[in-house]
Amino acid sequence: MSAPGSLTVIGGGLAGSLLALELAERGLAVTLVDAGEATATALSYGGVAWWAGAPGPLGRLLRQAPARWRRLQARHGRLGWRGCGLRLHGGGWTTPLLRPPFAQVDTAALMAALPGALAAAAVEHRRGRVVAPPRPVAAGWQLQLEPGGSLVTDQVVLAAGAGCRALAPALPQRHRASWAGVLALPASPSLPPASSSPWQRHAASRRIVQPRHWQRPSLEARAPELAEERWIVDAGFAPRGKGLLLGQISLVRPGLDPGEPPAVAVMERRLRAGLAGLDPVLAALPGPYHQVPVAFCSGGLPLVGPLGDTAGLWVFSGFGGAFAQVPVLAPLLADVIAGLADPGDLAGFGVLPG
C-alpha cells in the first residue's frame, strides 16, 4: 500500500528521472518505475539549444537551461553536461557555419550516472512495465506491473514518452509518436590520414555537427495532416561516451499509433544514403543501427500538468528539444505537484494538457 503523499513516476528517461529528482528534493516519497528498455534519451545527441526555443514565454524560459544543468550537477554529481563545439551545415552541404560555444549532455554519461543520483536522492527505482492505464482506487491509483504485480500510490506522473498514450488513451491528439534511428558507433571513427572526409576534424574534436535547418520539426508539425507515412534524414553526428552517434532518421505515420517498428534494413539504408550527402566517408562507417519510438507534440509545445479533472494524475511528455525543455519545466511541475504552486502557473507556457 502507499504511504501518505507517495508519488510514482512512470518512465526512466530524461523526463521521468529529472522530475523524480525534483520531487524528491521537495520532500515527496517518489518511486520511479522504469521498464529498462532503450529510451529516446539514450540515443539523443543531447544538445542543449537554449537559444532555439519558439518565441514566447517558453522560449524565454529555455534560457535558464544552462544554469539548471549546472545546478543539477552541483547537487547530484556529474551528469554529462559539458561545453561542446557546434558545427552547422545548411543551404547546401558545402556551406558550413560555426556557432559560438555550445553545450551538450553526453547521454552515455547521463544514463550511467542517473541510477546513483536517484538512489542518493532516496528515489525508489523499480524495474517493471506498467501494462495498463492507472486505475483509480480508494487509496489513490493502482498500477499493474510486469513483472512485480501491482503498486498503489497516491499520485501518478506519466513520463513514459511514446508509451504514454497506451497508459492514457485520452491524451490530447497533439501528443504523438515517431520512430527515430541513429548509427551508434561504440568508438570514435579512426579514419586514415589521407581520408577525404571534411568532417574528420570535428568528430575528433568531439563537436556536434547538425543541419542549420532541422527537417524533423516540420515533419512533426505536419503529422496531423499525413495520409501516409513520411520519413526524413537530418545528417550530422554527436559524441556519445567514447563513441559517436551518427545521423538521425525520423519516420512519422498517420494517426496516433506509431505502429510496429519499421524494417531495420530499410531504415538503415535510408539513413546512410542521407548521410552520404554530407560525407560519404562517414556514411560508410561500420556501426550498429538502433531505433526507438519518440514522443512529440505536433504543435511544438509539450504536455506538462494535470491530466483531466481527476486528482493525482499528471503528464510530463512530448518534448521537442528535451535537453533544454525538461530541466526548466521539471521544477515548475514539481512545485505544482508538491502544492507549492498553482497549475495555472503553467498556463502561460501553453503546456497544460487541457
Image (cartoon, rainbow, N blue to C red):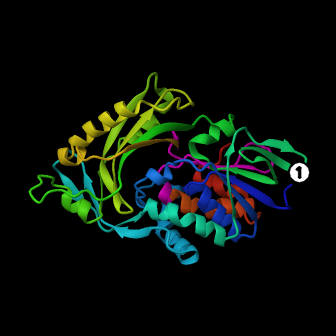
User: Is 103 or 333 nearer to us in this picture?
Assistant: 103
Q: Quadrant of residue 234?
A: top left
* Residue named by callout 1: 139
Q: Is residue 323 magenta?
A: yes
Residue 1 visible in rendering? yes
Q: Is residue 211 magenta?
A: no
In the rendered structure, the answer to whether residue 29 lies left or right of residue 297 reads right
**Measured from the top left, where is residue 212 in percent x and y?**
29, 50
Name the residue rendered at 29%, 67% in the picture: 100
Name the residue rendered at 58%, 76% in the picture: 75
Highlighted magenta segment, given as a residue range: 296-324
**Measured from the top left, where is residue 36 in percent x and y?**
59, 50
In the rendered structure, the answer to whether residue 284 lies left or right of residue 262 reads left
Crowd class of label 1 (few under 14; some 14 to 19; many from 20; radius 10 Å): some
Q: Quadrant of residue 244?
A: bottom left
In the rendered structure, the answer to whether residue 249 lies left or right of residue 196 reads right
In the rendered structure, the answer to whether residue 114 lies left or right of residue 169 reads left
The furthest residue to the right? 138
User: Is 267 or 232 nearer to us in this picture?
Assistant: 267
**Measured from the top left, where is residue 347 in percent x and y?**
64, 52
**Measured from the top left, where is residue 182 in percent x and y?**
37, 45
Amino acid at pointer 1: Ala
Q: Secondary structure at mark 1?
A: loop
Q: Quadrant of residue 14?
A: bottom right
Name the residue rendered at 35%, 32% in the picture: 265
Name the residue rendered at 30%, 65% in the picture: 85
